[in-house]
Amino acid sequence: MTTIQWFPGHMAKARREAVEKLKLVDIIVELVDARLPYSSRNPIIDDIVGQKPRVMVLNKTDLADIKQTNEWTTYFKHRHLQVVPISAKDGKGIKDIQDTLKELMSEKMAKLKARGLKNRPIRLMILGIPNVGKSTLINRFIKKNKAETGNKPGVTKGQQWLKLGDEFELLDTPGILWPKFEDQDIGKKLALTGAIKDTILHQEDIALYAIDFFARYYPERLKKMYGLQDEHLNLSNSDLLIKITERLGLKEEYDKASDKLIHDVRQGKLGKYTLDFVHEVGEK
Ligand code: G4P
């Protein structure tokens, strides 16, 4: 888990580093959290990436609402982005990324070949905000390559390239960019999913956000998880937190109850969910 305080100086540095790395690669893998396909994107990513080919990867689909993942996939495709839903943790979709990368690069590689240059690997880097799964994905790429070739991925000393078979070279450190800080709701979404951990937001406010979301969209799950009755769902969010605290046997320890609820949501104990809706943020 990466913890970074994003002060303006750090943002400028992160931007500079990302732009430097970008110069070294043919194509970018932009990694976002499938539960937050809008909120977990860096606000200036389009500006940084420019015209460079890019594959957008929705990670952690094992935790996200499948219907919404499909809606977001369509949404980005309409905006001319190649999208690949994956679960880096389970190793699902890794081949799809590689196939998409090859497809996107086929023309450029063919041109290079026509000019007499011999086939060279496609150079790529992974870019995203902290905790979207960049390191997990890098490890998956390495494992996949190991499984297919029986070799260890070659790492040349003093260079930062991981060789993935003959076809790819991956920059071994991902580009890290800062999350959106546009409004409180985005902050709460990022905090609830664990994208930002040390947050200026109070745990109770994050828990109340979760209660509001689940009471609205998945009331049955909330009832089942915390032994609530139908009539409890008419309570205000703060009264519901009081009720849940009671049900957890925590007396008036609302902080503890909030922590437990946030943990449950992050672990997927309240089921799969996606906090960003296409219709809410799609046009922003
Ligand atoms: P980063 O490099 O982008 O900062 O992210 P990293 O790979 O470290 O992943 C952050 C957390 O997300 C890790 O949890 C990792 O296991 C989890 N993760 C990554 N990909 C997936 C996925 O596809 N599905 C699920 N469910 N989780 C995924 P962690 O090591 O347990 O850290 P913590 O956040 O629990 O402290």
Image (cartoon, helix red, strand yellow):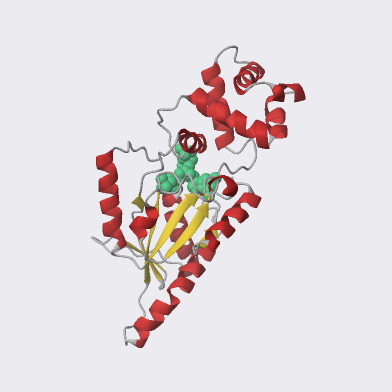
Horizontal and vertical percent for residue 88? 51, 53
User: Height in image: 162 above or below 121?
Assistant: above
Left or right: where 43 falls relative to 254: left
- Please tell me which residue is depicted at 71% across the width and 22% down the height of the picture: 232
* Front position in the image: 120 or 185: 185
Horizontal and vertical percent for residue 188? 49, 33
User: Height in image: 196 above or below 248?
Assistant: below
Horizontal and vertical percent for residue 272? 63, 43
Horizontal and vertical percent for residue 227? 72, 24
Q: Would you say residue 92 is visible in this rendering? A: no
- Please tell me which residue is depicted at 42% across the width and 51% down the height of the picture: 134
Quadrant of image for the N terminus: top left
- Please tell me which residue is depicted at 47% across the width and 50% down the height of the picture: 32
* Residue lying farthest to the right in this orientation: 230
* Residue lying farthest to the front in this orientation: 283
User: Height in image: 154 above or below 66?
Assistant: below
User: Height in image: 214 above or below 57?
Assistant: above
Q: Would you say residue 266 is visible in this rendering? A: yes
- Image quarter of residue 180: top left
* Residue lying farthest to the top in this orientation: 251
- Please tell me which residue is depicted at 42% across the width and 56% down the height of the picture: 138
* Front position in the image: 213 or 163: 213
- Image quarter of residue 108: bottom left
